[in-house]
Amino acid sequence: ITAVVVASYAQVMRFVPRVNAPPSCPVLNSTWMLGPKSSLFHQVCRRSASLWSVVAIVVLFMVCFYFSHHIYQFLVQPLADVFHETGRDRRMIYTALHEAFFTYVKVSFFAAMFIGFPFVACQIWLFVAPGLYKHEKATFLPFLVATPVLFFAGGALVYYYVLPVAWEFFIGFETGGGNGELAIQLEAKVNEYLSLVMRLIFAFGISFELPVVLTLLGRA
């Protein structure tokens, strides 16, 4: 996501010095007689976009924390389905007193970032759009729309296809023991499971952004 934002910002900011018409910032209802190169104009717009993005993430975090148990159960459902299909009745454990609480905090922040990414992308667009010509806006807008769509597509691919296949493969290494051998069974920890799922979702989501990054770099 960071690579997409940086590449997109670098691409569109090339056109800002060439704008002749005075821009209008969403925060400033008038142009304040600021030219397109005014540092004050860009500082106010940048701070506005950053503030609204932070507020949105904080609000989403609070909402997601209220539903953190349901969100975590949704993320752990692929593992539960594999256990059910193989006839295993299992549990998940945590070995530190604070582990479950901070796991719910992490899953809430993860969900807030995942859900709030389109809003953050819109704030970036509101910041850079006033410095673009009309045809430049038409060129850049499809990339803004494609970025969250591709990221969500990568996350959906992980959840609905990669996770069930991966969990079934890894659970296959369990052994029943007997004849003097010790059984090897999975005792999944809640924080380790969440960390692995988050890494996979973000890895596939960012990898799905490569077409956007490569296209922007090709036009730079």
Image: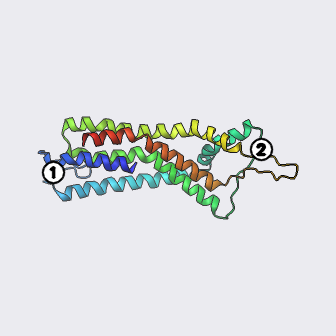
Residue at x 59%, y 51% (from the top left corner): 194
Element under disc 1: loop
Can I make out residue 67 in this image? no
Q: Residues within 10 Å of mark 1 (few under 14, many from 20)?
A: many
Question: Label 2 is placed on what type of residue?
Answer: Asp
Residue named by callout 2: 89
Residue named by callout 1: 36
Can I make out residue 168 in this image? yes
Residue at x 47%, y 46% (from the top left corner): 114
Q: From this viewpoint, which residue is outermost toward the right? A: 179
Q: Residues within 10 Å of mark 2 (few under 14, many from 20)?
A: few
**Residue 192 at x, y = what percent?**
62, 55
Between circles 1 and 2, the one closer to the viewer is 2
**Residue 7 at x, y = what percent?**
31, 47
Describe residue 139's horizontal placement relative to residue 68 as left or right. left
44 and 183: which is toward the camera:
183
